[in-house]
Amino acid sequence: MNTPLIDPFQRAIRYLRVSVTDRCDFRCVYCMSEQMTFLPKAELLTLEELDRMCSTFIRMGVEKLRITGGEPLVRRGILTFFNAMGRHLESGALKELTVTTNGSQLARFANDLAAAGVRRINVSLDTLDEEKFAAITRWGRLPQVLSGIDAAQKAGLRVKINAVALKGFNEDELFRLVEWCAERDMDLTFIEVMPMGDIGNENRLGQYWALSDLRARLAENYSLLDLAERTGGPARYVKLEETGQKIGFITPLTHNFCESCNRVRLTCTGELFMCLGQEDNADLRAPLRANPETDAPLEEAIRAAIARKPKGHDFDYTRQELGGQMSRHMSHTGG
Ligand code: SAM
Ligand code: SF4
C-alpha cells in the first residue's frame, strides 16, 4: 500500500473525485440554469492528462476514484480513460473505480464499464414520474434512464440511486422510491440541496427539504436501525428492518461530517478543491502541463494543496439566507 497523503488534521486522503467534463445532456433545475455556459474545450484536461493526474494521486495513496461531471459519460472517448484506470485496479493500487451518472448513456456503456473493472455505480434519479422527471431535468427523459439502469444491472453493476430531496417535489414519492429500490435490490441515498452555483430563477431555499424531516417520515412506516458504517463522506446510513434495505442520508447542511473527511475533488480543468464547501483550490494543470517529462512538480503541488485542506465547510441555512453560498456549480466540482 502506498503511504497516504495526510492533511493537517491527520486525515488520510484516500479518495479522489474527478469531474471529467462540465457538460451535461440534462439541465437539472437545482444544478444548472438552462442557458449554462460551458468552458472552452482547451481549458479541459485531455484524457491523457486525466490519466497522468489520477495515476499520480494513486501513486500518492488514493485508493478510490469516483468519476463524475457534468455527465461523465457524455465526454468523448471516456471509455479509453476507464480502460486505462483498469491497470491500477489490476495492480491492486486502486481498490475501487466508480461513476456517478444521470444514467442517460448507460444502455450504451454499462457492459464496457463493467469490463473496465467498474463494480458499482451511482445513478441520480429524483422522481419516478415521467412528467416530473422531464420538468426537474429539463432535457432528460425517464424511459431512457430506466433502460440505462436495466442495462447496468444486467451487466452486473451494483446500482445505488441518489435522489435529491426537494420540498413539494418528491416529498410524496418517498415511499414509492424506497419500494422501487427494494424491488430492484438497489440502495438509495437522499441528498440535501446544497447552495452551489447560479441556477437562474430557481429559489434554493424553497427547494430545501431537511433530511431530518424525511427521516422522521420514513420512521412512520419502517423501523430504522442506525448503521455504524462510515465512508469518510457526508453520508450516514440506516437499515430498514422490514426490508433489510440500506438508506443513506447526505446532510452536509444539518450535520457536520468534516472530521472524518478523506476526500478531495479535481475539476475538469485540473483545479483541486480540498473541501466541497470552500473556495480555496490549487491549480494542478499548470505544473502538469509545464512538465511533460516528470510528475515531481505535480506531486509537490498536490502535497502543498493537501497541507491546506481546511477543517470543515461553511454551508449554513440556519440564518435563512444562503450562508456559505458557493459561486461554482456542482457540475464543475462534480458533487
Ligand atoms: N451528472 C451526474 C449525475 O447527475 O449523477 C454527475 C454529476 S452531478 C453534479 C452529481 C450529483 O450532484 C447528482 O446526484 C446531483 O443530483 C447532485 N447535485 C447537483 N446539484 C446539487 C445541489 N445544488 N445540491 C445537492 N445535490 C446536487
Ligand atoms: Fe447534469 Fe447531473 Fe447536474 Fe443534472 S445533476 S444537470 S444530470 S450534472
Image: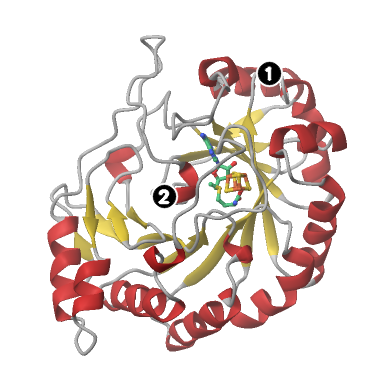
Asked if the residue under mark 1 is in contact with the one under mark 2, i.e. CB atoms within 8 Å, the reply is no
Which residue appears at 58% of the width and 22% of the height?
Answer: 202
* Mark 2 close to ligand 1, CB under 8 Å: yes
Q: Examine the rendering and report whether any part of residue 117 can be seen.
A: no
Quadrant of residue 49 within the rendered picture: bottom left
Q: Name the image quarter holding the N terminus.
A: bottom left
Q: Is residue 333 above or below residue 301?
A: above
Judging by the rendered image, the residue that carries numbered circle 1 is 217
Judging by the rendered image, the residue that carries numbered circle 2 is 333
Cα distance in 3D space between marks 2 and 1: 31 Å
Q: What is the secondary structure assignment of the residue under circle 2? A: helix
Q: Position of residue 59 (x, y in %)?
A: 28, 79
Q: Position of residue 160 (x, y in %)?
A: 66, 52
Which mark is in front, 2 or 1? 2
| Of pointers 2 and 1, the one earlier in the residue sequence | 1
- Amino acid type shown at disc 2: Thr
